[in-house]
Amino acid sequence: MIVTEHKQTSPDNGMTENNAPRIAVLALQGAFIEHENMLRRLGAEVFEIRQLSDWDKAKDGLVIPGGESTTMRKLLRDLRLLTPIRQAITEGLPVFGTCAGLILLSKEVEGEQSERIATMDTLVCRNAYGRQLGSFHIKAPFKGIVGEIPMTFIRAPYIKKVDDGVEVLAEVDGHIVAARQDRQLVTAFHPELNDDTRVHEYFLRSVVLQKL
């Protein structure tokens, strides 16, 4: 369900037909369609990663959506996508992970030793808000974006610890809910479920195109 109470977009996002980035969206499970729609609204070219052969297509960035991280991890392993994704991110491929994507990208997950993509120097707590606060919606500041942005949390994790080189971008009640390390961007919330494109625009402009 898309929350439409807040809408703010910028027509001047630094992209033209000549430099529109080509973004791969991991489409195995979770809210990948909502990411695709938002990226297209911003002028990006989008295609889906559903099997290993899709990975060979040219791309300027990758989005790993929210969903069920255990299921996504198993699918990545079974489809033999885990290693090539990890290698590409390590070599500098821009990536944006939301919720389950945050968990998959984190090098450490509290109480879990399973294999993940594990490219970001963070420690994450899964289902950190418990059942009563498992799903909620607020507005909060996000570093690099003017004004507060809407944040929808669904049985969300949060980042408990970051190492040097990881920039904290947003916090809610003292918990880190968005961070960036080089060309890796993660959020504990679901920006794709709100009618506000600014987080995706930040990814395209500042992480993929690396414009201020």
Image (spheres, rainbow, N blue to C red):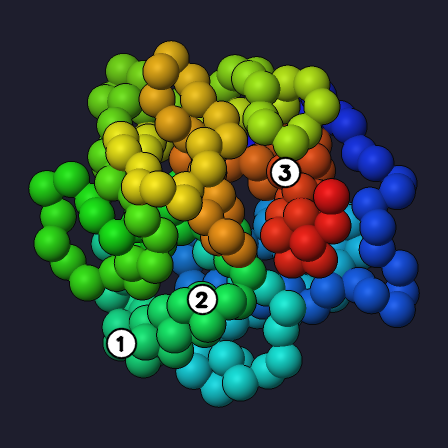
Q: Indicate the position of residue 138 as horizontal and vertical percent values.
A: 52, 16
Counting residues from the start of the chain, the first of labels 1 and 2 encountered is 1
Callout 1: helix, strand or loop?
helix
Residue topped by disc 1: 78
Q: Indicate the position of residue 1 as horizontal and vertical percent values.
A: 56, 34
Disc on res. 192: none
Disc on res. 89: 2
The relative height of residue 120 versus residue 9 in the rendered view (above or below) is below
Left or right of 122, for residue 63: right
Label 2 crowd (10 A; few <14 / some 14-19 / many >=20): many
Q: Amino acid at mark 2?
A: Ile
Left or right of 42, for residue 84: left
Counting residues from the start of the chain, the first of labels 1 and 3 encountered is 1
Callout 3: helix, strand or loop?
helix
Q: In this view of the protein, which residue sits in the foreground, 167 or 81? A: 167
Q: Indicate the position of residue 10 as horizontal and vertical percent values.
A: 83, 36
> How far apart, in angstroms, are the residues tagged by discs 3 and 2?
20 Å
Label 3 crowd (10 A; few <14 / some 14-19 / many >=20): many
- Closer to the camera: disc 3 or disc 2? 2
Label 1 crowd (10 A; few <14 / some 14-19 / many >=20): few
Q: Amino acid at mark 3?
A: Val
Q: Can residue 43 be seen here? A: yes
- Closer to the camera: disc 1 or disc 3? 3
Left or right of 175, for residue 150: right
The relative height of residue 92 versus residue 129 in the rendered view (above or below) is below
